[in-house]
Structures are given as C-alpha cells and as structure tokens.
Amino acid sequence: MALTLLEITGVALGLASTILLIRRHIGCWPTGILTVIALGIVFFEAKLYSAVLLQIAFLVLQIQGWITWAQKKRTDEEDGLQRLTPFLITSIVTILFSVTVALGYAMKTYSDAALPYWDAFCMVLYLIGQWLVIHKVVECWYFWGLANVITTFVYASQGLYFVALLHLAYIGISLSGLISWNKSYQEAEFLA
C-alpha cells in the first residue's frame, strides 16, 4: 500500500496528541479527534475493520475526554492521577479476553478482515487504555505500550509502514508517559 498524505497527516497529529497527553495538556483531545478521523480512513482502505471501529470509538472517547478534562479544569478539581485497584484489574482482564474472542470471531466470520483476532485484541487494549486515560489512571500506559508493540507488526504486515513507524515510536512514548505519570503520582503521594 502506498504512503498517502492522509496517513502522514494522521501520524503527525497522532504524535502531537500523544506528546500533549503525556503533559496532561487538554490540547491532546482536539488533535486526537483529527488523528482518529484521518487514520480511520486509512485503516478502512487497508481492510483493518477492527481498527476502523476503534477509530470511531476513539472519536467518541476523545470527545468525552475533552469534556471531562475541561469540566475538571473549570471547577479547579485536582489534577490527580489514580492507580488500578485489584477489582478493576480483574474486570479489565475479563473484558479484554471475552470481547477480543467475540469481536475476532465476528470479524473472521462476517468480513474480509486481514488479521481479525490480532486486530480485535489491539482494539480492546486501546479502548481500555483510552478509558483509563480519561480517568488519569497511571497504568493506562501499559495497555498502550502492549497494543503499540502488536500494532507495529499488524500495520507493517498490511503495508502501512508509516503508521507502523508511528506505533513503534508510540512504544517509546508509552514508556515516557508511564515514567512521567508514575513520577507525578509518587510526588503527589509524597506531598499528601
């Protein structure tokens, strides 16, 4: 698949959005909205339908995140980070595997999806990660990191080399985000 201007645009916006997210800057949400629109079209053309559904879900979650963060900023609510609880970890793992199997099966059975189970697994990882980002949960970066490792290979296998490079960069960015958010969390705990 040939590199397109839309793919380049989506990658550039994606990098900008993620850098803003690490800094917990509200500008991550509008740049994220533009990213998911551009990449949604790219993934549709590559027949990565779970990735297209993911971009649609991301669009909704980007809007929700923007609203949530804007409301907290307006009300001067604490910019606090959170950690996962054992109950939430168990719930997330259950959702991750059950939805992956169901969605992967549906994509394999009812579409011409290129890599239905890998695509579905990454979709669910990213959705969980995005939900955790909205709620400023430090462990969101683990979900992003794992999904980025897998999608680097998924996108490269479909000829989306520039998007694969983006996700390769996202692996390092996820590590940076984890370090930054964890440091902020520990500093807040120390001051509390």
Image (tube, rainbow, N blue to C red):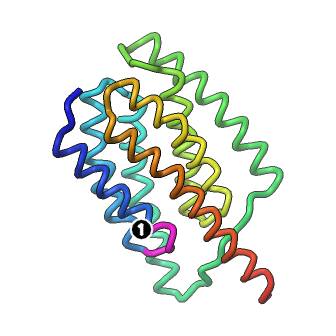
Question: What residue is at 67 percent from the left and 30 percent from the top?
Answer: 97
Q: Quadrant of the N terminus?
A: top left
Question: What residue is at 35 percent from the left and 41 percent from the top?
Answer: 163
Looking at the image, residue 93 sits to the left or right of residue 14; the answer is right
Question: What residue is at 72 percent from the left and 82 percent from the top?
Answer: 188
Residue 65, position as x, y percentages in the image = 46, 64
In this rendering, the answer to whether 77 lies above or below 178 is below
Residue 83, position as x, y percentages in the image = 74, 63
Question: Residue 112 occupies which quadrant of the picture?
Answer: top left
Look at the numbered disc 1 and give the secondary structure of its residue: helix
Looking at the image, residue 8 sits to the left or right of residue 32; the answer is left
- Stretch in magenta: 20-25
Residue 97 is inside the magenta segment: no
Task: Write down the residue under mark 1.
Answer: 66
As drawn, the residue found furthest toward the right would be 86
Looking at the image, residue 76 sits to the left or right of residue 80; the answer is left
In this rendering, the answer to whether 96 lies above or below 70 is above
How many numbered callouts? 1
Question: Residue 174 occupies which quadrant of the picture?
Answer: bottom right
Question: What residue is at 64 percent from the left and 66 percent from the top?
Answer: 179
Q: Amino acid under label 1?
A: Trp
